[in-house]
Image (spheres, rainbow, N blue to C red):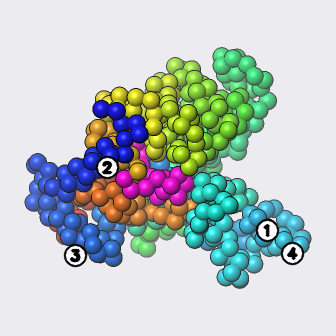
Amino acid sequence: MKLRGAPLVVAFMLSAICTASAQPARGQNSNETAAAARLEALRGDSARLAAFLRAMPKGGDLHNHVSGAISPVSWAGWAAADGLCFVVSTAALSRPPCDGRDRIPATRLLADSRLMESAVEAWSMHNFHAGSESGADHFFATFGKTAAVGNAHLGEMLAEVMSRAARDHVSYIELMVNADDGSAARLGAQIGAKDFSAMRAELERDGLEAALRHVTSALNDAEQRQRELLRCGTKTADPGCGVTVRYIYQIVRNRAPQVVFAQILAGFTLPSIDRRYVSFNLVAPEHSGVAARDFELHMRMIDFLRASHPNIPITLHAGELSRAVASPATMRSHIRQSIQLGHASRIGHGVDVLQEDSADSLLGEMARRHVLVEIALASNDVILGVRGPAHPLAAYLAHGVPVALATDDEGVSVSDMTLEYTRAVSDQHLGYVALKTMARNSIAYSFADDTTKKRLQSELERDFDRFERSPPR
């Protein structure tokens, strides 16, 4: 069957999946059956459903940008502490001097509730309503408005994300963050437009690997600060201390080709320098002019460099597109290219899969190759306007493609993992068994080392057993 442009087929699949997911699975134990029935009984009670889902073990969050995960209130506090300015006309933070009515000290945000509200609305999707600015434009603009803080508070960022994850019963996170000083991008900017072999040779000769070695000390300092803030190792330790974290290096896809190449090489190199880095990903709006124009070029760069780094697993943003931001021509092949040329074993978002050429064969290939899709329901809604039956989650499930829920940018989207699970129940009509499978997938398809993965899987099964014995009433 052809799926492209077939909403009735998708709706039928969604109905079938919803019905199936509400039924006990073969081999399901009595406690799991009771938990599944309990979720079904709570569908009409939003408060009690939220309590049930918050207490449910959720495994890992495999798609989480640190800079997008932070609360606007935290940005304001750090900006005030660092003596930054708030530009009233643009709601952006900037370096001093704070020398006018439009450039005021960021400390004013903490004393003026109306000013703080304007910052919260500018730095997140809180109270956003599309008008002259689209959801996508507003969303992606938030990052530049808080960028002046930089990584100066990375330890505080880790503490906030890990504490929130623990409250949501998330035990593992792969965080997208660059703990380097931008040296890879700077080295890339210095080389001319050459073939891949020449660019790699020049970057290696210029000391790219040596320039990345300080990442270890930067992470050590940030994690030490995080442990201090969460009181790890004390009697009053925050539950976030128990969350396992690994890191994914970010390549900014709308930069010059040689800069992107240098960052991709850095992404392949970092895991050999610090094992806490497990992969890399291309970030920035996929629909932007440079990113769309150079998409295949970036995949060819990955293909070339992977030959010398075959053991680095790859996850790629692909198909984070809809008619709201992209033309049909742009949505024909990004997911397929990411898998076949970019060697991705996981895809972030994958929203436009039904718009790709030969969508049914692509879905079949993803199922056969066990390519997991990182599903971010809130962000797909606020950026792309894709929700409910318009979302391809049902198609992925119907074709046996593994999926896991993820937060993406929970601070900007005003979400968390519990709310992602709530959307899966309310908007996608999934049942307990489907949610449990996604939680298990989030650990099974993680890039954690085998020893860590086995520990996390064992802990997840233990937590499910405890939860199912006495779920929230």
Residue lying at 27% horizontally and 73% vertically, measured from the top left: 44
Q: Pointer 3 and pointer 4: residues touching (CB < 8 Å)?
A: no
Q: How far apart are the alpha carbons under marks 3 and 1? A: 49 Å
Return the residue at label 4: 101
- The reply to whether the magenta stretch includes residue 428 is no
Q: How far apart are the alpha carbons under marks 4 and 2? A: 54 Å
Q: What secondary structure is found at the residue carrying circle 3?
A: loop
Q: Is residue 118 above or below residue 405?
A: below
Q: Residues within 10 Å of mark 3 (few under 14, many from 20)?
A: few
Along the viewing direction, whichever of 358 and 155 lies nearer the viewer = 358
Residue 343 as seen in the image, left or right of residue 180: left
**Looking at the image, is mark 2 or mark 3 earlier in the sequence?**
2
Residue 167 as seen in the image, left or right of residue 106: left
Residue lying at 38% horizontally and 64% vertically, measured from the top left: 418
Pair 4/2: label in front: 2
Report the disc number at residue 89: 1
**Looking at the image, is mark 3 or mark 1 earlier in the sequence?**
1
Position of residue 244 measured from the top left corner of the image (x, y, whole percent): 42, 53
Q: Amino acid at mark 2?
A: Ala
